[in-house]
Image (cartoon, helix red, strand yellow):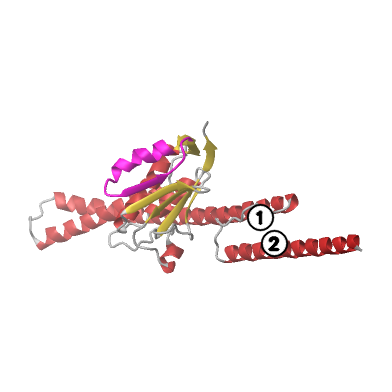
């Protein structure tokens, strides 16, 4: 009798464990679906607490989610680069003769201070400004090829700290943390994020490694409306902004096999967190 009671108790315990495990798997499936629905392709579920086969399946799903996100980013960047090349070509072709003719008339015997001279100068200055504006946007479609090397992130971030003495820095990087990246491009990306943080009124910046180099600041939060357009070329909320910084920064990372993303998960006390994704290398 005691044996049968023991077997019954064991069977009930196994059934309870099985049902609990099934609930865990169901919850995981729900979280993955929600992440995809919200286009949160940085989302990844932990592997602990799973059986070996389930662990491999979860790892594959995490990788697949990241790959889908990367494919979308690549297609979006390619489309914007094509559009930028067409627009810059057409605008430059239209502006070149206007700038040339107005310059020639200004160099001729035009009475200085006359309405005619003022009008010509306005035309020339406007065309020159537009040409410079377009030349700046050519950066979006004519980036140099990256030259990735192993970068010691602690030393790298330390070299940027003196550029922004007005910020309170909170750097949480273990010694020897190394990532594979083009140092010049990575520096340009980090400096752009810090510049935006300062312009948004940030006083504190937190930098750490969490499946990528996370850069958090306590400046003005980014609204959901702005978030959707954040990496669109030429989009800006600043009165005198160019709308090129974040788009260019993302392209700089994508070209070297990484990415730049806005995180939906914020550190306590911080309003905005960007994640610079790149290949990680752990130093000795």
Neighbour tally class for label 2: few under 14, some 14-19, many 20 plus, Cα within 10 Å: some
- Give the residue number, with chain letter if any, for mark 1: 61
Q: CA distance from mark 1 to mark 2?
A: 13 Å
Who comes first in sequence, dot 1 or dot 2? 2
Q: Residue at x 46, y 64 (%)?
A: 228
Nearer to the camera, 225 or 47: 47
Please say whether residue 58 is visible from this viewpoint.
yes
Circle 2: element type? helix
Circle 1: element type? helix
- Give the residue number, with chain letter if any, for mark 2: 25
When the figure is inspected, residue 71 is found, relative to residue 176, above or below; the finding is below
Most extreme residue toward the top is 284
Specify the segment rendered in magenta. Answer: 154-176
Q: Residue at x 38, y 61 (%)?
A: 235
Nearer to the camera, 59 or 90: 59
Most extreme residue toward the front is 2
Please say whether residue 89 is visible from this viewpoint.
no
Most extreme residue toward the right is 1
Q: Nearer the viewer, mark 1 or mark 2?
A: 2
Neighbour tally class for label 1: few under 14, some 14-19, many 20 plus, Cα within 10 Å: some
Residue 7 in which image quadrant: bottom right
Nearer to the camera, 206 or 230: 206
Horizontal arrangement in the rendering, residue 243 relative to residue 259 (left or right): left
């Amino acid at each position: 009798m005691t044996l049968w009671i023991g077997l019954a108790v064991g069977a009930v315990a196994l059934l309870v464990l099985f049902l609990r495990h099934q609930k865990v798997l169901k919850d995981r499936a729900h979280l993955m679906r929600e992440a995809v629905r919200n286009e949160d392709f940085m989302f990844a579920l932990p592997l602990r607490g799973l059986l070996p086969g389930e662990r491999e399946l979860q790892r594959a799903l995490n990788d697949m989610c990241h790959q889908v996100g990367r494919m979308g980013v690549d297609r979006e960047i390619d489309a914007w680069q094509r559009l930028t090349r067409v627009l810059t070509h057409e605008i430059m072709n239209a502006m070149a003769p206007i700038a040339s003719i107005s310059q020639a008339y200004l160099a001729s015997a035009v009475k200085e201070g006359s309405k005619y001279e003022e009008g010509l100068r306005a035309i020339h200055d406007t065309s020159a400004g537009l040409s410079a504006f377009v030349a700046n946007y050519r950066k979006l479609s004519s980036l140099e090829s990256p030259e990735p090397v192993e970068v010691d992130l602690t030393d790298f971030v330390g070299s940027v700290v003196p550029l922004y003495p007005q910020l309170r820095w909170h750097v949480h990087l273990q010694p020897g943390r190394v990532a594979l990246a083009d140092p010049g491009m990575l520096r340009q990306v980090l400096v752009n994020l810090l510049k935006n943080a300062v312009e948004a009124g940030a006083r504190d910046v937190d930098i750490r490694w969490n499946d990528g180099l996370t850069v958090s600041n306590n400046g003005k939060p980014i609204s959901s409306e702005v978030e959707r357009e954040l990496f669109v070329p030429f989009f800006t909320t600043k009165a005198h902004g160019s709308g090129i910084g974040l788009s260019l920064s993302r392209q700089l990372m994508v070209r070297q096999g990484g990415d730049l993303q806005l995180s939906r998960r914020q550190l306590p006390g911080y309003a905005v967190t960007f994640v610079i994704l790149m290949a990680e290398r752990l130093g000795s």
